[in-house]
Image: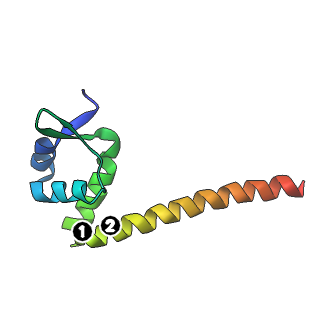
């Protein structure tokens, strides 16, 4: 179980409100595991949590803003991946 961290530990380490963490979960921005009344975040999702926390606390972005930024960045990443695939196809087709 070392591949995750509890919500309580995150709140303490990052000095955030529990309600902010819960809001991220409720909005679907974070995928949280539940075990024995304790919520856990996988270490794989820690970088996303840190981004959301930084945007919220350092840049004063509210939850709807975080959702929009996340959606736009996800779309941008998908478009970049699609562009790479198409570029490889064009290069192969030209040869």
Q: Residue at x 27, y 54 (%)?
A: 50
> How crowded is the residue under tag 2: few (<14 C-alpha within 10 Å), some, or many (20+)?
some
Q: Quadrant of residue 43?
A: top left
Colouring scheme, one of rainbow, by chain, secondary structure, one colour: rainbow
Q: Which residue is mark 1?
A: 63
Q: Position of residue 19 (x, y in %)?
A: 11, 58
Q: Residue at x 83, y 52 (%)?
A: 92
In the image: residue 8, left or right of residue 53:
left
Q: Residue 14: x and y, percent? A: 15, 51
Does residue 17 appear in the picture of this structure? Answer: no
Q: Which disc number belongs to residue 67? A: 2
Image point (88%, 58%), residue name:
94
Give the quarter of the figure containing the N terminus: top left
Mark 2 element type: helix
Question: Looking at the image, do the residues carrying marks 2 and 1 touch, with CB atoms under 8 Å apart?
Answer: yes
Q: Percent from the top left, x then y, of residue 75?
A: 50, 64
């Amino acid at each position: 179980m070392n591949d995750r961290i509890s919500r309580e530990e995150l709140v303490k380490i990052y000095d955030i409100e529990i309600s902010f963490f819960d809001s991220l979960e409720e909005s679907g921005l974070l995928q949280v595991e539940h075990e024995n009344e304790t919520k856990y975040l996988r270490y794989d999702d820690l970088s996303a949590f840190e981004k959301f926390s930084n945007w919220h606390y350092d840049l004063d972005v509210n939850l709807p803003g975080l959702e929009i930024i996340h959606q736009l960045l996800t779309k941008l990443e998908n478009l970049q991946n699609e562009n790479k695939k198409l570029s490889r196809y064009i290069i192969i087709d030209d040869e």
